[in-house]
Amino acid sequence: MEPVIVAVDQGTTSSRAIVFGQDLAVRAVEQREFTQHFPSSGWVEHDPEEIWTTVVETVRGAMAKAGVLAQGVAAIGITNQRETVVVWDRATGLPIHRAIVWQDRRTSAECARLKAEGQEALVQARTGLVIDPYFSGTKVAWILDNVEGARARAERGELAFGTIDCFLLWRLTGGKVHASDATNAARTMLFDIHRGVWDEELCRLLRVPMVMLPEVKDCAAAFGATDPGLFGGAIAIGGMAGDQQAATVGQACFEPGMMKSTYGTGCFALLNTGSEAVASRAKLLTTIAYQLAGKRTYALEGSIFVAGAAVQWLRDGLGIVKMAGETGALAAASDPEQEVILVPAFVGLGAPYWDADCRGAIFGLTRGTGPKEMARAALESVCFQTADLLAAMKADWPAAGNAGTVLRVDGGMVASDWTMQRLADILDAPVDRPHVKETTALGAAYLAGLSAGLLPPPEDFAKRWKLERRFAPAMDAAARDAKLASWKDAVERTLTRR
């Protein structure tokens, strides 16, 4: 049999393993959900041990479904929920606290203090990020301050820090490798994206001992090999990227000006800016899109905290739908005369607002408002937020709009034709849905295959990208402008910093 590649896609609500053939066709998929913990308002945690268990189970399950043994796997690629923090004991490999998830807002006060001290300019210049609880640095400090003895142990070198990719790599290699890749390091608020190194001054500012930090590698690199006991033999680990950067690779957005948006729990849009790290004036993030052969490629990123999570809220919180896939049909049947606007600030608002303290709100409710209108409002909220990001990107980098924008999309929500058509209408831009929708896992698989010498360079990989369907805008300008005006009014009423 030809060698295969296994992609580990460790997300916010589930872990998946996907086996890809050398032609990058999907051979098998295995998935496990895991528990979401909400210990306090605005706090979100995961059990790293449960994540670890789901990853091992899904890899084993996917390999079994594909009928492959360890010796038939050329490499493993890892992609992960970004910014989520794990601190563990180097001697035992055991976490000292639950993982603090990227959505978590517990460090809002600390971030406000840093801003009040005038530190945001320094942070943004070095990292491309704004000061926000979203990022890893203040989460690490919180664990060190709130677990008894942790700070002293960290300073003695007894504890390790990592994002989920790093923790999984440590476990997969039996504690032999403490490393991450440039895209995940770029999301910590501790990494200088211009020099490509951990920044000593930022580590002092955020009170994170540098001895805790992992080695930073390219996205396609030799990350080590799995413990032979896990999967029946050692398997090389050759690729690693945060989920949004992996999706950028999977969507073959290798040329400056190309843009992708992933619709999962949150929504994350990345615009490739090439070798130029564009400093945002519109409250976007400057980040590393990918790093290959020591060369960094940059992107502007807009981060929306709640996209698919709004649909999950309809299902699990309100009981309006039993399955997420029902929302598109409901929205299509809604009353167009009712202008219901949902601002899904359940954990604050991300780009371009960065208001950690505002909370969700619904406007325009009437006695006639029902499940159909609520479904439409939830789906439209994702479209409106994407429009905010696109406008900010064009303001920061005018070249993005010169040739017309085409958005490549992926993630669970893109299966809804209604949502994708409404997205194209609101953006007034074409929306391209690829033939292979597992683009995040595909990106991780490609990076691993590239490292293993199994797959071609990026320019040749890009030729394999195939369009499944293009959604062209069909809404008239007056209707679009009216909807966007209603959205902006609702957001202004929701923000704490008016």
Image (tube, grey):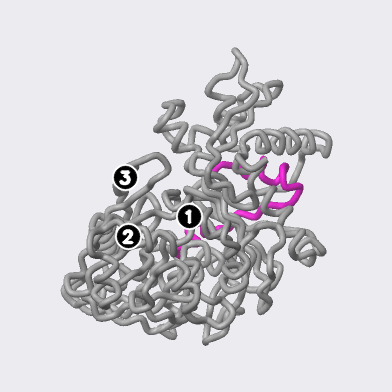
Q: Quadrant of the N terminus?
A: bottom left
What residue is shown with label 2? 145
Q: Amino acid at mark 3?
A: His
Instruction: Provide the secondary structure element on which disc 3 rests.
Output: loop
**Residue 232 relative to residue 114: left or right:** left
Q: What span is colored magenta in the figure? A: 415-441
Is residue 65 something one can see in this rendering?
no
Q: Nearer the viewer, residue 187 or 275?
A: 187
- In front of the other: label 1 or label 3? 1
Q: Quadrant of the C terminus?
A: top right
What residue is shown with label 3? 37
The mark nearer the N terminus, 1 or 3, is: 3
Q: Amino acid at mark 2?
A: Asp
What residue is shown with label 1? 133
Disc 2 crowd, CA 10 A, few/some/many (<14, 14-19, 20+): some
Q: Amino acid at mark 1?
A: Pro
Disc 3 crowd, CA 10 A, few/some/many (<14, 14-19, 20+): some
Dot 1 and dot 3 residues touching (CB under 8 Å): no
Q: CA distance from mark 2 to mark 1?
A: 16 Å
- Inspect the magenta stretch and tell me whether residue 371 lies in it: no
Is residue 180 something one can see in this rendering?
yes
- Inspect the magenta stretch and tell me whether residue 435 lies in it: yes
